Amino acid sequence: MGTDGRRWIFADQLGEHFLDAAGQPVLLIESRAVLRRRRFHRQKAHLVLSALRHRAAELGDRAVFVQGDTYGQALARVREPLTVCRPTSHAAAEFVAGLRDVTVLEPRGFASTQAEFARWARERGRGRLLMEDFYRDARRRLDVLMDGDEPAGGRWNFDAENRQPPPPGGLNAPRPWRPVEDEIDERVRHDLSRWERAGDMAFVGRDAPRAFPATRAEALAALDDFTAHRLPRFGPHQDAMLADDPVMAHSLLSAALNLGLLDPMECVRAAEAAYHAGRAPLASVEGYVRQLIGWRDYIWHLYWHLGPAYRKENRLAARVRPPEWFRELDAGAVRARCLSWALEQVRDHGFTHHIVRLMVLGNYALQRGFRPGDLADWFHRCFVDGYDWVMIPNVVGMSQYADGGTLATKPYAAGGAYINRMSDFCGGCDYRPAERTGDAACPFTAGYWWFLARNEQRLKGNHRVAVQLRNLHRLSDLDEVCAREQDRGTDPP
């Protein structure tokens, strides 16, 4: 079968780069069963349906748009051969592979192909598949920020410059681009409310005006706005957190990328052009490029390389079900300012930037021993940019260290001192980051030592935490700390 027949595109394959010919006919399916299977964030459900319906409207007569209960029922109404780019989850890929009259093509939407990743992985031999090595290989192969055979500026990595705490007085970056809702959004909101009232499905989080692109034109506007106005300030403080500035200089393009509205390489080339034109410093551009062709592609390829069983990894034997206040985004139940603020951001926006995810939400879950699979599902459902391929490696491997070091070289656990250094949360908090016992003991500081004590035997071979494990036994109050944290359990801190 040629590739110019009717192309079935999923709701995260909405860009033209998922098609092969001008005017190619398209199939789109809106399945309500997908929204019934999980309690997604209300704003995530809105964004996905809005993007899917906008794409159907743009395609007009080129598209067959089936709105129904399940994919199987929808496909039964389409009586012609189909092609489809391999979907982005193990379950969906297995589903399409078993369909008759559907030809599955190679996946798209990433800078490196699976063949290129496989070649790189083979060349590593028995060595670890380190993201930094993959990123450098991609830079060379794609000729990104290169001066001949050498990296621009003589360095591959500007992390040392890009890990600064928030500046006094705030970052004062320009506000991000935001879309204006239209009649399609109005209908999506009406349908979601109607289905929820009927008990057909339920959501988590609050409804709000759509904040992320749902069309190619909107995605390009958001990309242009970021490249011109916030990319120049992105690098130095990309790991910082500010209570009054949840966006800072972050791109907010992950949702558009993961819907397929942007190709990662067009984002890379736009940033590279800004650097060469003198409109953005190299450290900021390199940090942003690293996220696109380094981390994002690396996570995608590891999802497939590690296979479906990876989601069940639990080397730290974390057995705690995330408590109801966490699952339901009950920010008001939490006194710890950083955690309350993070849950509020997820509740109200379905989004936080990466350091809040890793060092507040993920760090707390790691310390408390939340089940990694449950936590990955929570991130998948509650974040507008969350998908299976994104969250399984990021949460199971990076955030929760549940694979014992396959992905990350150490657990991303930290006490209140880190949060105090990289944010302005601690000044207005009931807890004190330097205290681990008593009524003012920071739950992150006490929780950090409790985490190390619980997992000492599992971590003792990791040289990156050797100093911390030695310091563990220098604490005269360790037994008290552990007893208090054990007693605290999953109560809201």
Image (cartoon, rainbow, N blue to C red):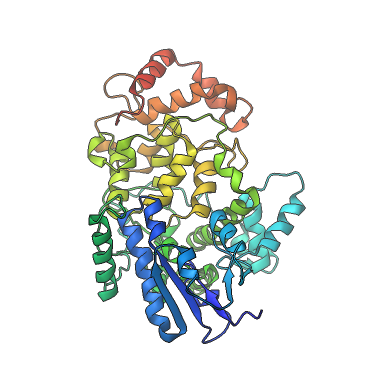
Indicate the position of residue 442 as horizontal and vertical percent values: 33, 28
| Camera sees residue 204 | yes
| Camera sees residue 218 | no
Q: Compared to 377, does 292 lie above or below?
A: below
**Which quarter of the rendered picture does the C terminus lie within?**
top left
**Residue 362: quadrant of the picture:** top left
Number of labelled discs?
0
Q: Compared to 161, does 453 lie above or below?
A: above
Q: Residue at x 47, y 63 (%)?
A: 258
Indicate the position of residue 402 as horizontal and vertical percent values: 55, 36
Q: Judge by depth and name the residue closer to the eye, 426 or 78.
A: 78
353 left or right, relative to 120? left
Q: Judge by depth and name the residue closer to the eye, 166 or 370.
A: 370
81 left or right, relative to 429? right
Q: Compared to 470, does 322 lie above or below?
A: below
Q: Compared to 190, does 236 lie above or below?
A: above
Indicate the position of residue 269 as horizontal and vertical percent values: 53, 72
